[in-house]
Each structure stands twice: as C-alpha cells, then as structure tokens.
Amino acid sequence: MSRRAEMEATLEAMLFASPEAVPRDRLLASFEEGEREEAAEALAAVCARYAAAPERGVVAEEVAGGLRLVTRPDLHGALRRFFELSGRSRLSMAGLETLAIVAYRQPITAPEIQELRGVNPAGVLGTLLERRLVKIAGRKPVVGKPFLYRTTREFLMHFGLESLDDLPPLEEFEELVGELQTAAEAPEE
Amino acid sequence: MTRPATSRGQLPESWRVELPVFEGPLDLLLHLVRVNQVEIADIPVATVCDQFHEYLQLMDELNLDIAAEYIFEAAQLIYLKSRLLLPRPRDGQPADGEDPRQELVERLLEYRRIKDAAQSLAEIDGIRHGIMTRPWQRLPADADEGLDLGEVSLFDLLGALKEVLVRYDREHPEPLHLSRESFRVRDQFERLLAALEDDRPVDLLDDLRRLSCRAEAVAAFLAVLELARLSLVRFHQTAGGELLLFRTERQLQAHELEAIEG
C-alpha cells in the first residue's frame, strides 16, 4: 500500500469515526511534519470523493470550522421512514426572525430583541435555547443586568456555516439605510 | 351525524374572514406599507394609522386576543400622527430639522432587513433540516484504560459493591430524627411542687427561663396557675421585681391532682 493511499484511508477513517466536525489542522496534525503537505492533498482527495454526487448518500461538509461526514439532505424522507422517526418540528417564522436578530446583532439582550421585532421574545428565546441554537453569554452591565444571547456552534452546524462571517450579507439594506440617513440630513443645510 | 350543527361549513359566508398571519405589529405595518404601494421612507402615517386601527378593530370583533404589543404600536402611531398634524414653522421646515417619522422608518427598515435574513435562514433550514449525522457516541476506550476482565473475580465485584455502599452510607448519613416534644401541665405541676417541698421559694421568672422551649414554659405557667388555684402556693414580689413562689400549708388532695390536665 502506497503512503498516499494509506493517508487517504486514515483520514477517511478519522472523519468516519469522529462524532463531530474536526478542524482540518487537527486531522493533519496526526501526520509527521514532513508529510503534512501530502496529507493536505490526501484530505482534499477524500473530500472530493465525498462531494455530492447522485450515487453518494454520505457527503463531506465543512462546517463550524471543521470537516464532517453527513447524510445527503434530500435523503431524509427515506431515512426517517427507515428509522421510524417522526418529522422534526421546524422553526417558526417568529423563531427564525429572533434567531436572525441574535445572529446579526449578537451579543444582544431580550429587551433589545423586542425593540427590533416589536414583540416580546421570551417564549421564542426559550425554544431557541432548548434547541441549543442560542446560548446565554453573560449579562449586560446595565440596569436589571439582562442576559446576553449569542448563537452557538450548533447554530453554525445547523445552517452549514463555517463561521459567523459566512452569514448572508445584508449590505444592500445597509446601503439603503445610508441613503435614507443622508436624505434625512439634507433639509438641515 | 358526527358533525356538530355549528361546524364551519354551515357558517354564513360573511363570517369567513381571510386574515394574513402577522409576526407582530411591525410585520403588520410592513404589510400596510406594501398594500399602499409606497416606499417605507414615504410612509403615509395618517393612512397607515387608520388602517392599523381598522385591523385591530377587526381582531377585536373576531374575539382574537390582541397582544399588548399591537396596542402599544397603535398608540405610538396616534402620537406620531398628532405630531405631524401640529402646525409647522412658516418656512415649511420642521423646527428640529427632523422628520418625526424618522424613527419609525428606521425601525421598519431594520425590521425588514431582519425579515429578509430570517427568510434566508428559513430557506437554508428547509434544505438542511434533512441532514443526519452520526449520533454522539463514545469513542472506544484507550488501550491504556482498557480493563482485563479476566482478572476480575466475582469477589472483586462484590468487594467493589461493598465499598460503594459503605461510601454511599458515609456520604448519605441517616437523617437525624427529632421526636416531637410534648409537655404536660401535670408534669410541670409535680416538678414545681417537688421543688417547693423543702420550704425553699422558687423564683418563677428564673425557673421559666431555664426551660427548654416555649411549649414547656407555657405548660409550667399553666401549672403555676393550677397551684395558685388550689391554694398550694402563694406569690411574693420582691423589690427587684422577682416573683417568688412559696409553698402553703395546704396539702394536695389526690383527686385534685387527677383533675389536672394530663
């Protein structure tokens, strides 16, 4: 067995046996320093082998700063029947709006979320905490010391994001606000 | 017939109302901006305010619970409308150089951005909720930590169990049971009588102070009252305020003792 083939096999086995996304560096660190470059190529080859293809049920994905093997999303119907699972309850629009606020404006308190959505977010935050999509990250040093909320690693994994920088940009809207502000300032001149 | 007479199919046509579902007052406002076909920045406050109230009225007529947030927003809109109705300075510019609608416009724009972001998240969620991963599993234990079960005998297991049980007992000692104390007047009666037997006075307050608890003191006090009633003691108060009990000549009759509450 060639060294290269052995590397690919080892990396594939590591990914298969890992219970969560493993950072690339950690996978490569298990090889001698002199071999790292070749190991990186081997890892790329493994990832290519697990790229989405019609005949592939398991795919590799890069998420939350690591690599992992997952089932292809569109196979869930067959898998749910096979494991006799009931459909997981999806997030409500209220949940997604609150999640979006936390994601883009974190860390943020419940009153600040209410200010943005116009609705008391207590119940929705409970659901998001339960589903471990958000977490409490300390308290804000203001009157009442409200909890600060942040998104979790679970959130990155669920939405397939490598990091928070991966969130879909809101630039066009930022620009719109910018224009609006200049328009509002104009009458003062 | 299983369907009740008031089932939906038999309601008059006019009762059926199509209501879009709103995620909150800001969502409703965005909807109104959309149906009026205006830009958020040019929001016609008077029109939108009226439509907002019409909507609340509709909710009220339908006996829907109107969340406090809607009422708060409705009040904000009326306030804004009233500010816009105030006469402006002659030059046609607002006094503070600011459109009173500015804050509302900014909130709506921010909310619309959030809604769009939520929409993106919903789309991603729609695709990715079908992903399955390996459930969290324990990795096989390290070789160093592995156990050679061949060397463990039944007695080793029993010994381990015994150790665990002993430690459990040590860490979970039996709770201390305190029995409920009851104090009988008659006991106190007899105790005081005995204390007075040698013609020595008893300092009542001092005596009561020495008792273990309030219940015992109450029993002793009742006993003193009994003693006085039966003329077995007399009181003497000293200049210092002490209450002294002295034994009288009278002898206690057996039936009198019997009569005292047990």
Image (tube, grey):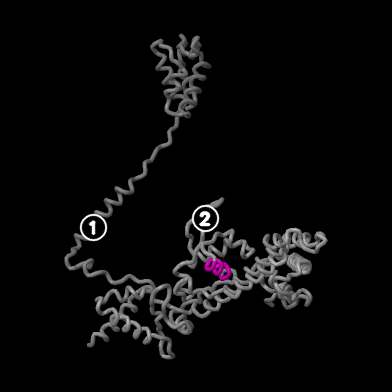
Task: Confirm whether residue B174 shows in the render.
Answer: yes
What is the chain letter for disc 2?
A
Q: Secondary structure at mark 2?
A: loop
How many marks do you count on the picture?
2
**A98 falls in the magenta region:** yes
Q: Residue at x 52, y 19 (%)?
A: B225
Comparing B157 with B188, the one in front is: B157
Residue type marked 2: Lys
Q: Are marks 1 and 2 on the same chain?
A: no
Q: How packed is label 2: few (under 14 Cα within 10 Å), some, or many (20 or more)? A: some
Task: Give the CA distance from mark 1 to mark 2.
Answer: 49 Å
Could you say where residue A153 lies in the image, as x and y percent from the top left?
44, 69
* Bounds of the magenta segment: A96-104
Q: Could you say which disc has been placed on residue A140 in the image?
A: 2
- Of circles 1 and 2, which is in front? 2
Q: Which mark is residue B212?
A: none
In the image, residue B62 lies at what x, y percent? Answer: 74, 67
* Overall secondary structure of the magenta section: helix
**Residue B120, percent from left and from top:** 56, 76
- Using residue B249 as the reference point, say whether residue A96 is left or right of it: right
